[in-house]
Image (cartoon, coloured by chain):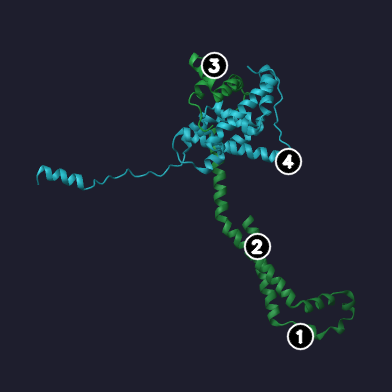
Chain colours: A cyan, B green
């Protein structure tokens, strides 16, 4: 066979490319969970606490979030992906909690911890301002400004369309800015 | 309003830290989203920076263990679900059989019950012979079988719970 014929053969016969076998996602193991928990539990607690205004509820929802997270057994991709999944779970649980509280008490209540120290007083005042926002607005602002999630990640965490995130976030910022201005805290 | 502004993250960071560049300031002046973000970022940064109470988070191994226990309980419940459904079915069948048997021979049973009153005991000689005759062998067998089934079901329930 000549070199030309060989080239022609190579050009016409499709080369079978064997795709790398897809590995089934491994369930998260204890060591991975432990490092993931140590990395994200504190920030998740802060998020739930700022959302609900109650440290006991934050404790409860934090554990529930991790239980649900482990029960769902999400495929171990990246930590970032797992973190987003965890925040989404916590957000759903917090909103369920708001619905239950509303049903039980007839209105939405944010319980705020009694303060005893200077930093606690400051937190108390800030929590009161934050509590005047709707739960979704609180969640949006925290995820965008503190957790620094982009709109797509927020939409995933809150179950909103990415287009809606921009609009709702804009309104939430405006509302917070108005509140801050009203209380003489605005810039 | 469809896509987020590419500079939003930079604006948020600049507003939170107070490190502005002229270019970013110019951008904020022309972008409503970034302007809104800049207006609340410093306050939110202060809010996030306040230390939470001396909060002790549960140990990860405890959370892991609890989750495993909950998972096992859920798995056990899933396995036992068909058994529970079968048990419920058995309760219903036995109850339906009792209802059918009692309806079938209600007259006879009613007469028996009346025979147990003190007045009937005193005049015991006048026992209705027809009542005894109407109790068929099938009825007695049905009562025996149903009683056995009821006892077995009750024992099964008690033992399963234990």
- Residue B32: horizontal and vertical position, in percent? 56, 24
Q: Give the distance between the C-alpha atoms of the residues marked 3 and 2, in whole angstroms.
A: 72 Å
Residue to which mark 2 is pinned: B155
Residue occupied by mark 3: B17
Mark 4 Cα-neighbour bin, 10 Å: few <14, some 14–19, many ≥20: few
Task: Using the rendered view, name the quadrant where residue B116 is placed.
Answer: bottom right
Describe the element under mark 1 as helix, strand or loop: helix
How much space separates mark 2 and mark 4, taking CA atoms?
A: 41 Å
Question: Are callouts 1 and 2 both on one chain?
Answer: yes
For disc 2, the neighbor class at 10 Å (few under 14, some 14 to 19, many from 20) is few
Viewed as shown, does residue A59 lie left or right of B134? left
- Disc 1 vs disc 3: Cβ atoms closer than 8 Å? no
Residue A103: % across, % down: 71, 41
Residue A139 in the image: state x and y as whole percent. 60, 31
User: B122 or A146, which is in the foreground?
Assistant: A146
Q: CA distance from mark 3 to mark 4?
A: 42 Å
Q: Percent x, y for residue A29?
A: 46, 39
Dot 1 or dot 3: first in sequence order is: 3
Which of the labelled discs sits on residue B133, or is there none?
Answer: 1
Residue at left offset 64%, top offset 25%: A176
* Mark before the other along the chain sequence, 3 or 2: 3
Question: Where is mark 4, residue-wise?
Answer: A104
What is the secondary structure assignment of the residue under circle 2? helix
Residues flagged by tags 3 and 4 on a common chain: no
Q: Which residue is nearer to you in this view: A184 or A107? A: A184
């Amino acid at each position: 066979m000549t070199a030309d014929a060989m080239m022609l053969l190579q050009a016409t016969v499709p080369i079978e490319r064997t795709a790398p076998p897809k590995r089934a996602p491994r369930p998260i193991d204890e060591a991975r969970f432990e490092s993931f928990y140590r990395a994200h539990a504190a920030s998740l607690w802060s998020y739930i606490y700022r959302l609900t205004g109650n440290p006991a509820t934050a404790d409860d929802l934090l554990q529930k979030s991790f239980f649900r997270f482990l029960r769902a057994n999400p495929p171990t991709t990246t930590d970032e992906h797992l973190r987003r999944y965890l925040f989404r779970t916590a957000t759903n649980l917090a909103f369920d909690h708001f619905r239950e509280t509303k049903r039980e008490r007839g209105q939405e209540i944010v319980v705020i911890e009694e303060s005893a120290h200077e930093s606690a007083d400051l937190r108390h005042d800030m929590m009161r301002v934050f509590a005047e926002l709707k739960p979704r607005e609180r969640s949006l602002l925290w995820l965008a400004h503190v957790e620094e999630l982009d709109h797509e990640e927020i939409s995933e965490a809150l179950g909103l369309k990415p287009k809606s995130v921009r609009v709702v976030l804009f309104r939430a910022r405006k509302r917070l800015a108005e509140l801050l201005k009203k209380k003489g805290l605005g810039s | 309003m469809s896509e987020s502004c590419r500079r939003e993250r930079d604006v948020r960071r600049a507003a939170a830290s107070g490190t502005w560049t002229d270019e970013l300031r110019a951008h904020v002046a022309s972008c409503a989203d970034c302007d809104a973000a800049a207006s609340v970022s410093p306050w939110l940064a202060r809010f996030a920076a306040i230390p939470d109470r001396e909060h002790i988070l549960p140990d990860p191994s405890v959370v892991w263990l609890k989750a495993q226990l909950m998972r096992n309980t859920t798995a056990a419940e899933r396995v036992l679900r068909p058994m529970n459904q079968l048990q419920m079915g058995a309760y219903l069948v036995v109850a339906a059989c009792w209802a059918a048997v009692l309806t079938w021979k209600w007259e006879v049973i009613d007469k028996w019950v009346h025979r147990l009153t003190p007045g009937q005991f005193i005049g015991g000689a006048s026992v209705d012979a027809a009542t005894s005759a109407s109790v068929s062998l099938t009825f007695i067998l049905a009562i025996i079988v149903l009683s056995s089934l009821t006892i077995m079901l009750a024992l099964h329930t008690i033992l399963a719970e234990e």
